[in-house]
Each structure stands twice: as structure tokens, then as C-alpha cells.
Amino acid sequence: MSDKIINLNDAILDINAECKFENKVPYTDYSKIVWFDGSPTVSKADAETKMAELQAIEDDKPTLEEIRASAKAKLIAGEALTEDEANTIVL
């Protein structure tokens, strides 16, 4: 599981990268968003749905420690590594 926390900024920009806005901590409170004049907007429901979707995707990603452990086990067993596993090796 990845340690990255997805917030509304991530969700809004994933829906529409043209959105221009300002947001304040905690970045998960839609009422704190100030949309800039002329910017497209994203509804609260759409942003929160996308935030949950992106967090689920992020949570499914292995941590760096999990990738390293998998790479080590594969090296010991003589198996091929994935690109992510190979990238964890320091030469």
C-alpha cells in the first residue's frame, strides 16, 4: 500500500487540468476552494468521487519496501525483475 494521500487538488486536476483554483489546508474540504474567474469548475460530488477513486488506485500500489523485498526474493530465486523492482537496485 502506497503512503501517498490523494486530496481534492489531485482529483480536480485529474478531472480537468484546465481548472484554476486556490485551496487551503486540509485540501479535502470542498468549501475551502476558491475558483479563479473564468476557470472551469468541478462539482463537489465529482471531485469527492474522483478523490476516492484515485486513493483506491494509490492504495493498491506497493510500497518501496514491498518492491525491494520482491526484487530481493526474485534475485535469490533467479527470476526476472519488473522495471520498478530493477529501479530499486543501487549500482
Image (cartoon, helix red, strand yellow):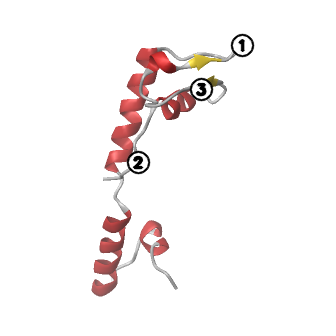
Location of residue 57 in the rendering, given as x and y in whole percent from the top left corner: 37, 43
In percent of the image, x 38 and y 64: which residue is there? 64
Q: Is residue 62 above or below residue 42?
A: below
Read off the residue under disc 2. Answer: 4
User: What amino acid is found at the position of numbered circle 2 in the picture?
Assistant: Lys
Contact, CB < 8 Å: mark 2 with mark 1? no
Q: CA distance from mark 3 to mark 1?
A: 14 Å
Nearer-the-camera pick, 29 or 12:
29
Q: Earlier in the sequence, mark 2 or mark 1?
A: 2
Read off the residue under disc 3. Answer: 16
Q: Is residue 38 left or right of residue 65?
A: right
Location of residue 63 in the rendering, given as x and y in whole percent from the top left corner: 35, 60
Q: Is residue 78 above or below residue 26?
A: below
Contact, CB < 8 Å: mark 2 with mark 3? no
Location of residue 48 in the rendering, given as x and y in whole percent from the top left corner: 40, 23
Read off the residue under disc 1. Answer: 38
In percent of the image, x 46 and y 15: which residue is there? 31
Discs 3/1, front: 1
Secondary structure under tag 3 reads loop
In percent of the image, x 47 and y 29: which residue is there? 8
